[in-house]
Image (spheres, grey):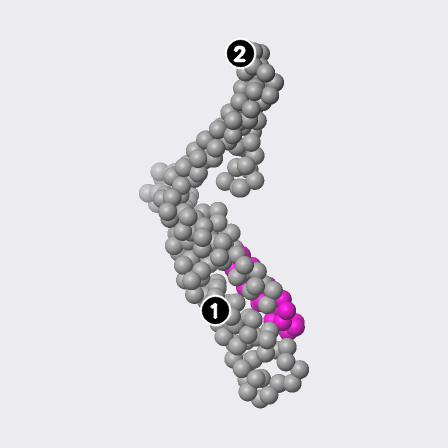
Amino acid sequence: MNGFLAFAARTGLAVPSSVTVWLVSFFAFDQTFLLSSAIATGGGAAVYTGASVYMKHQFLKKHHLTRSEYLYIQKNLREAKPKIFRLQKALFSIKDIWSLKRRIELVRIARKIHNLTKREPKRFYKAERFYFTHLDSAVELAEKYVFLSSSPKKSREMSQSLVETSRTLEELTETIEKDLYHVLSDDMSDLKFELDVAKHSIKSNKDSSIPEEGRRL
């Protein structure tokens, strides 16, 4: 569930509960205003905490994850976020207009993998190569390219290094595209299966609609 929606749902449960507890404490049990308010606050906090625990439990159950697995994945997602920001900053600092579209695509793919994993943490295990190897390499290469290209005077070796870095970054972009396909591989398999079933169903319907005489011919 989206973080904001989860917060809104917990709050939507806690606030009415607090109001109900306050009314019962103040009118039914004849408590003072301050004491009723304190009890209501405690009751609302208990409902909010209970809802949070329940929702997290349901989330982990839905995605077939243990708590330790979820914490491990969240740790890696938090570490990846500033790396993606650094990658974007470096790539958009490059002044080569011809490669702009490809650089935008690389940032888009990196964000797509991160967002998919954030929504469905189980996908992390299909994206480990991206998080542990390819993302770091992309950030390092992009920042290296920016550093080399910012030099006012470029030696022959430096120019050659720029060409090699650009070529390697292009190859890495293709590798990260494959990472995305790997993350989505289960979805594509499910889609293929559903398409096969749909095609079979359509063919069966067509066959059944042919008159008996026509089939004998």
Residue segment shown in magenta = 91-111
Amino acid type, callout 2? Phe
Residue at x 49%, y 54% (from the top left corner) = 78
Dominant secondary-structure state across the stretch colored magenta: helix
Q: Name the residue furthest left.
A: 216
Q: Residues within 10 Å of mark 1 (few under 14, many from 20)?
A: some
- Residue lying at 55% horizontally and 26% vertically, measured from the top left: 41
Q: Quadrant of the C terminus?
A: top left
Vertical placement of 167 versus 111: above or below?
below
Camera-side residue of 163 and 12: 12
Three-letter amino acid code at the position of disc 1: Ser
For the point 38% across and 39% down, which residue is it?
61
Residue 170 placed where, x, y %? 52, 72
Q: Residue at the spot x=49%, y=57% of the render?
A: 79
Q: Nearer the viewer, mark 1 or mark 2?
A: 2
Q: Give the CA distance from mark 1 to mark 2.
A: 66 Å
Q: Contact (CB < 8 A) between labels 1 and 2?
A: no
Identify which residue, 179 or 22, lies in the foreground.
22
Residue 147 highlighted magenta (yes or no): no
- x, y (%) of residue 212? 35, 38
Q: Secondary structure at mark 1?
A: helix
Residue that sits furthest to the bottom in the current view? 156
Residue 110 inside the magenta-drawn segment? yes
Rate crowding at label 2 as few (under 14), some (14 to 19) or many (20 or more) other CA atoms within 10 Å.
few
Label placed on residue 137: 1
Q: How many marks?
A: 2
Question: Can see residue 156?
Answer: yes
Q: Which residue is mark 2?
A: 29
Mark 2, secondary structure of its residue: loop
